Image (cartoon, rainbow, N blue to C red):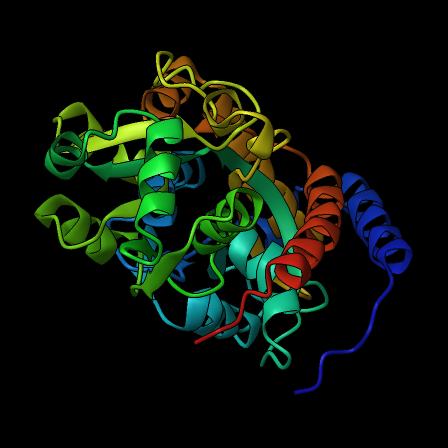
Amino acid sequence: MMIRARTRRQWLGTAFCATAALAAAPLPGLAQEAWPSKPVRIVVPFAAGGTTDILARAVAPELSKALGQAFIVDNRAGAGGNVGTEIVARAPADGYTLLMGTVGTHGINRALYPKLPFDPIQDFVPITMVAAVPNVMEMNADKARQMGIDSVASFIAKAKAQPGQFNMASSGSGTSIHLAGELFKRMTGVQMTHVPYKGSAPALLDMVAGNADVMFDNLPSSMQQIKAGKLKALAVTSSQRSAALPDVPTVEEAGGPALKGFEASSWFGLLAPAGTAPAVVQRVHQALARALATPEVKEKMLAQGAIPSGSSPAEFAQHIAREHEKWAQVVKDSGAKVD
């Protein structure tokens, strides 16, 4: 279907109206009590083992405990997250199919793909942002040692001395991981060959095996291999250092003047199909926000490099609108294209 143009003001107005409806909608009543009466599916539009999958599997048990039904993670990877996202956009708006959306599915893809089979704004109701996550610039640890690369600066020097000899793995063309690398290339003038994979997990397998040279991965999905010493973390892509890797500098810190202002973090949040009852959205938001505020869940996420959020539906809607503007410009400036 053709995407209908919608201004940021119109979108925010709709979001605030929806939030008002949430606040006004009473929870007691037969309709509300009937939901959920069966398992709820959380579609993850990427392969198992990546950050989207990790976060979905972290919150699913918490929602199950709070709402009394199983919340089941269903991985539907493909087309930069578009396959799984379309499944949810076309699902009945009955509260039994939700999406773990990302900066890619709801902040980047509308600018990257000229025609989408869904509208990332009109076809969804934001519930809450689950977490914000920095990316990490990393190399295979053995390869980094062999090449004498121990910092962003030494990587840039080596890459410029051998233009086009480095390949850059990503979780797929046009993903936030890919665009973080494209932004790095544009700001430094480094030439690297992009190698897209179907998700972070298969890309990481090749990184650990030494078949890929560098990657800008979401920190949670790479944390285990970094701690095991198989991957070398050169820098994090956030504006501040990560509490999970306090000794690893930011790209801006480590890269010098050429990388001043570099920032390319990711985010992940729960959404429902448009038309989902406000009372259902409210119940999911309240249960998830409470879970994300517990010490146990916060500690688990922070240890993986994710910063838990729990924002309101209106706050999440505002964030999505801002991300559309930001990444549309990055896509345009970088010339990023879908392979």
The image position of residue 190, as x and y in percent, is 44, 48
Q: Residue at x 43, y 74 (%)?
A: 83
At x 33% / y 25%, what residue is drawn? 151
Q: In the drawing, does residue 30 fall left or right of residue 86?
A: right
Residue 264 appears left or right of 57: right
Q: Is residue 240 above or below residue 143?
A: above
Q: Residue furthest bottom?
A: 1
Give whichever of 82, 256 is nearer the camera. Answer: 256
Quadrant the C terminus occupies: bottom left
Tell me if residue 234 comes above or below residue 197 in the rendering.
above
Asked if residue 276 shows in the view, the reply is no
Q: Is 63 or 306 nearer to us in this picture?
A: 306
- In the rendering, at what x and y percent does residue 120 appear? 64, 65
Residue at x-position 69% and y-position 66%: 275
Q: Nearer the viewer, residue 183 or 313?
A: 183
Describe residue 303's horizontal placement relative to residue 289 as left or right. left
Residue 309, image x, y percentages: 56, 29
Quadrant housing the N terminus? bottom right
Instruction: Identify the residue at image location x=33%, y=22%.
Output: 300
Q: In this view of the protein, which residue sits in the foreground, 71 or 115?
A: 115
x, y percentage for residue 43? 40, 60
